[in-house]
Image (cartoon, grey):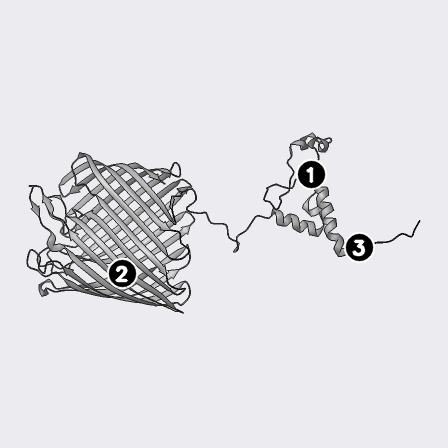
Amino acid sequence: MGPKTTRSITAGASRPRMRACLLAGCAIFASMPAGAQSLDNPSIASTTTSITGVTGNTAAITDPQTTGAVAASDLPPALDEDFNRLNRREETIDGLRTRIDPHEGQAPGIRIGTFVLKPALSETINHERQQNGSSSESRSFLETGLKGSLTSDWSRHQLSVTGEGVLQNNISGKGEEEPRAEVDAELRLDLSDETTARLRAGYSFEHEDPDDPNAVPNAEDQSAVNIYRLGAAVERDFGLIRGSVGMDFERRTYGDVELNNGTTISEEDRNRNLGVLTGRIGYELSPALIPFLEASVGKSNYDLRQDAFGFERSYQSYAGRAGLEVDLGEKLNGELALGYGTYRFDDDRLGDLRGLSADGHVNWSPQRGTDVLFGLATYLDPSTIPGEAGSIDYELTSIVTRQLRSTLLARLSNSLTLSDFPSDAASSDEATWRTGAGLTWDMTRYLALTGDVSYERTNRDRGESSDTARIGVGLTLRR
C-alpha cells in the first residue's frame, strides 16, 4: 500500500464550496415533506417556507421559533449578507418612495407608425339658466365633444397636435347654442444641445359671448369668431445666459350677427391681423432660479381703414416685463412677470391704452395626488363702441385637481376677469367671476362617467349684473 498523499486546500478556495453546501442543505431541508416536519407539532404543516431567489420569486423565511427552519441570524456572515440582499426591497437611487405613475391605467392610445393617437368622445346632457337683470331664460341641451392628441415617438425632434370640438343641440327651452373648436400643432426641432427651434400653428372657432362688452344687443346669434395662428421661436443657451426670440402672427375674422327681427349686421370692420415680435434674456442664478427680462413690439392692422363709425382702430403695441422663472421639480415650477404696456391707436380721438401688466403661471403639488395651477394674464380687448379704444383685461385663474381614489378625480376651478376701461370711457368697468366643480369616475380605462356644475356672474360699475348657472352629466369614451 503506497504512501498517502495529502491535498492542500486553501481557506480562500474552500469558502465558495462551503457556501454551496450550506445552501444546498438549506434547500433540501426546506423541500422536506410537510408531514415529516410536523410530527411534533401538527400546526406546522400549514406554514409556508421559501426563500426569495434572484429570479424574483417572492417568499419569506419562516420563524425558527416555530418551525425549526434556518434563520438568517444563524448563518455565517457571508450567507447572512446573501439573505439580506435577496430579501431587501428594491429601492430608488435617491432612497425616496417610488412615485405613482399618473398615466397608469389610462387608455394606451392608437399607434399610427411613429405616432400615438389618443382620442376621446364625450356626450353630456346639461341644463342651463341665464339671468340678465330682470329677464331670465333656461334651456336643456345635448353637448357632443371630440378631443384628442397626436404625438410623435421620435428619438429627436417632436411633433404634437391637440384638438377639441364641441357641438350643442337644444332639446328644450330657449338660449343660444355655443359651438366651439380648437386645434394646435407644434414642431420642436432639436438643432443642437444648446439650441431649440419651435414652429406653431393653430385655429379656433367660437361664438362671441353674449356678456362681452362688444356683443350686439337683441341678437339671435352672436358673431362667429375665427382665429388663425402662426408662430416661430428659437431658444439658445449661452452657458449661464439663456436667450430666445419669437414671432407670432394672428388673424381674426368676425361673421355677421343675426338679430331677433331677422335682419343681419355685418362685422367685417372688426377683421384684423396682429403680429408680435418678442425677445427674452435670462440669467441662471441656479438651475432652479432664472430671472429674466422680456420686451415685445407689435402691430395690428384692420382690413378696413375705418370702422362703421369712421374710427381708425389699427394700433401699435409696446411692452416690457421683468420676471422670475422657478423650477423646483414636480412640487413647484412656473414663472411670474410684471411689466408695463402701451397701445397706440392710429386715430388720435381714441387715445392710448396703457397700464401695468401681470403674466405668469405656477404649478404646485402640495401633496401626492393634488395639483394646483395658478395663472395670470393681461391682454387688450379693442372696443366697437364709437369713441372708445377698449379695455385692458386682467385674468386670474386657479385650477385644483385631486385624486380621491385611483379611479376618481375631483376638480375645482375659479377665475376672475377685471376689464379696466379708461376713465373717460362711456363703458363701465366689469368684473366676471366663474367657478366650477366636477368629478370623473373611470369605470374602465376606456369609459368614464363625468359630472360638472358651474356658475358665472358679471358685475358692472353701473349696477348691472348677469348670472349663468349650469349642471351636466355625461359619458366619455377613450381609446
Residue 128 percent location from the top left of the image: 21, 38
Q: Amino acid at mark 2?
A: Ala
Disc 2/disc 1 C-alpha distance (Å): 71 Å
- In the rendered structure, the answer to whether residue 355 lies left or right of residue 308 reads right
Q: Residue 30: which numbered mark, if any?
A: 1
At x 15%, y 63%, the residue is: 315
Residue 153 percent location from the top left of the image: 40, 51
Residue 49 percent location from the top left of the image: 65, 38
Q: Which residues are magenta?
A: 47-66
At x 82%, y 55%, the residue is: 8
Does 50 lie within the magenta span?
A: yes
* Residue 51, visible in the rendered structure: yes
* Residue 69, visible in the rendered structure: no
Q: Tell me the SS state at disc 1.
A: helix
- Mark 3–mark 1 CB contact (< 8 Å): no
* Mark 2 crowd level (few <14, some 14–19, many ≥20, 10 Å Cα): many
- Residue position for label 3: 9
Q: Quadrant of residue 345?
A: bottom left
Q: Nearer the viewer, mark 3 or mark 2?
A: 3
Q: Residue 358: which numbered mark, if any?
A: 2
